[in-house]
Image (cartoon, rainbow, N blue to C red):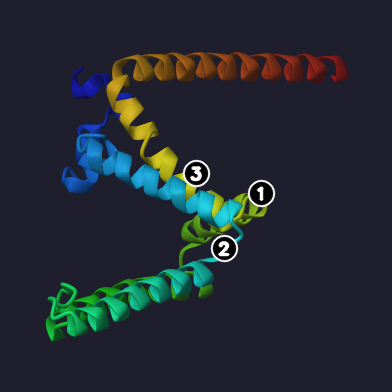
Amino acid sequence: MGSSDRLFNRQRTVHEIFGGGFVADVILWRQKNVTVGILLVALASWVVFERSGYTLLSLVSSVLLLLLTTLFFWAKSAAILNRPAPPLPELHLSEEMVNEFAAFIRTRLNAILLVSQDIALGKDTNLFFEVAGYLLLISIVGGLADFITLGYTSLVIILTIPALYERYEDIIDKYVKMVCKKSQQLYVKFNVECIRKWILEKQKLG
């Protein structure tokens, strides 16, 4: 399908819109094993948090306790039985990694603070209404579902809707354009009827 036939006359493909890299491949199911793995892990996490009564803190603490206990007794038994110690990777954060992470966080926080300052000082009215709209939407959705369910639902939507759209892009674009055209026609007809009615009422009053 040519670029002029795409929805909103966009020039880029769905894959390019999502960055064109590994993340785009995962979202669009070009790395099926990774995508399915993410969905299964997310589903398992949702079941654990929603059905077992665990909270994030209690689950992390339990997993760490189990891991440390297993490694501790493995190392002790290996020393007694003259066996090799458990294979552990080198647990070390380099200064370069810390500096890159700190720079990333600093850049993002500065951008958020700058936007917040512009909104607070009334410099960008459109941005204010945009941010307020997003926050209101998040507040409404957050009141309907807890954070874990919302996160899982959002992940499922991200990993299904774009892939389905890319697969049936021609059909979806065709029907969306048809609906938009019909809506515009109805809107014009409604406006014409309202204006005609208003003129007739004015003539009667006159």
Q: From the image, state whether disc 2 or disc 3 is nearer to you.
A: 2
Neighbour class for label 1 at 10 Å: few (<14), some, many (≥20)?
A: few
Residue at the disc numbered 2? 54
Q: Are marks 2 and 3 in contact (CB under 8 Å)?
A: no
Query: Residue at horizontal 51%, vertical 13%?
Result: 182
The image quadrant where one finds the C terminus is top right
Which circle marks residue 153 in the picture? Answer: 3
Direction from residue 177 to residue 73 in the image, left or right: left
Tell me the tag on residue 144. Answer: 1
The residue depicted at 42 percent of the width and 49 percent of the height is 42
Give the image location of residue 196, x and y in percent.
Answer: 70, 14
Whether residue 189 is visible to the viewer of this picture, yes or no, is yes
Mark 1 element type: helix
Q: CA distance from mark 2 to mark 1?
A: 21 Å
* Residue 17 showing in the rendered view: no
Q: Earlier in the sequence, mark 3 or mark 1?
A: 1
CB atoms of marks 3 and 1 within 8 Å: no
Residue 13 occupies quadrant: top left
Give the CA distance from mark 3 to mark 1: 12 Å
Foreground residue among 118 and 17: 17
